[in-house]
């Protein structure tokens, strides 16, 4: 069966609605017209989205903003972006950010909880789906994680 992309993103936001409200973080979801349904391992992609959104919430101050975006890149690629305007990541740490157990520094992470596995798991899942994942960040300004998923050609006819 296929997953409606807009529904999938709305449901991630719903799963975090308590924390988002508590922290007064605004979440905006934007799905480009033309992005509808695709076949994917919903449990696994939810795990990717949950890891990325939980990071965006953890590392963004109160009253911050998170943006979830979906668009079609070429005919056969879906691109999903999770962006925040939080604390960002220093340049020197960017090359190791997807490594297992890597966390930026003890001081900033001490009270946040977590083991440093979220991004490495997200990358494994995306790769297993034939996609790619990239992170861009500017210290003090925010972080943007973009991942792609291939759209199987046969789905086009079904939509
Ligand atoms: P876990 O995901 O296992 O609970 P974690 O969030 O620390 O722990 P990752 O999700 O792998 O681990 O992230 C690794 C590190 O990258 C984090 O400790 C944090 O320092 C940094 N990081 C990840 N996402 C963001 C973000 N959106 N903004 C700022 N820093 C981030
Ligand atoms: Mg994490």
Image (tube, helix red, strand yellow):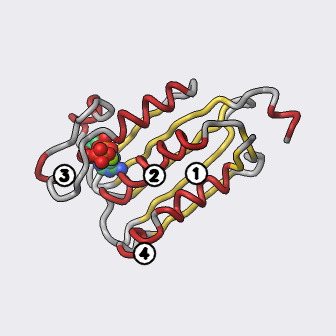
Query: Label 3 vs label 1: CA separation?
Result: 27 Å
For the point 47% across and 69% down, the residue is 17
Q: Earlier in the sequence, mark 2 or mark 3?
A: 2
- The one nearer the camera, 138 or 24, is 24
Q: Which mark is residue 109?
A: 3
**Dot 3, crowdedness within 10 Å: few (<14), some or many (≥20)?**
some
- The one nearer the camera, 109 or 34, is 109
Q: Which mark is residue 69?
A: 1
Q: Earlier in the sequence, mark 2 or mark 4?
A: 4
**Disc 1, SS:** strand
Q: Quadrant of the C terminus?
A: top right
Q: Position of residue 48 (x, y in %)?
A: 47, 42
For the point 35% across and 41% down, the residue is 118
Q: Quadrant of the N terminus?
A: top right
Q: Which residue is identified by label 2?
A: 83
Q: Position of residue 33 (x, y in %)?
A: 75, 51
Q: Is mark 3 within 8 Å of ligand 1?
A: yes
Q: Earlier in the sequence, mark 1 or mark 4?
A: 4
Query: Label 2 vs label 3: CA separation?
Result: 19 Å
Q: Position of residue 21 (x, y in %)?
A: 42, 75
Residue located farthest toward the left when viewing the structure as drawn: 107
Q: Which residue is identified by label 4?
A: 21
Residue located farthest toward the right when viewing the structure as drawn: 157
């Amino acid at each position: 069966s296929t997953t409606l992309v807009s529904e999938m993103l709305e449901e991630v936001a719903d799963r975090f609605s308590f924390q988002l409200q508590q922290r007064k973080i605004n979440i905006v979801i934007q799905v480009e017209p033309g992005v509808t349904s695709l076949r994917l391992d919903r449990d696994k992609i939810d795990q990717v989205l949950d890891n990325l959104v939980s990071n965006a919430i953890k590392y963004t101050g109160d009253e911050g903003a998170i943006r979830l975006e979906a668009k079609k890149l070429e005919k056969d690629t879906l691109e999903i972006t999770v962006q925040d305007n939080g604390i960002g990541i220093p340049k020197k740490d960017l090359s190791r950010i997807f490594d297992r157990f890597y966390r930026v520094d003890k001081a900033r992470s001490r009270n946040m909880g977590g083991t440093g596995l979220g991004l490495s798991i997200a990358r494994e899942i995306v790769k297993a789906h034939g996609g790619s994942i990239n992170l861009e960040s500017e210290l003090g300004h925010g972080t943007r994680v973009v991942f792609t998923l291939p759209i199987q050609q046969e789905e086009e006819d079904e939509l």
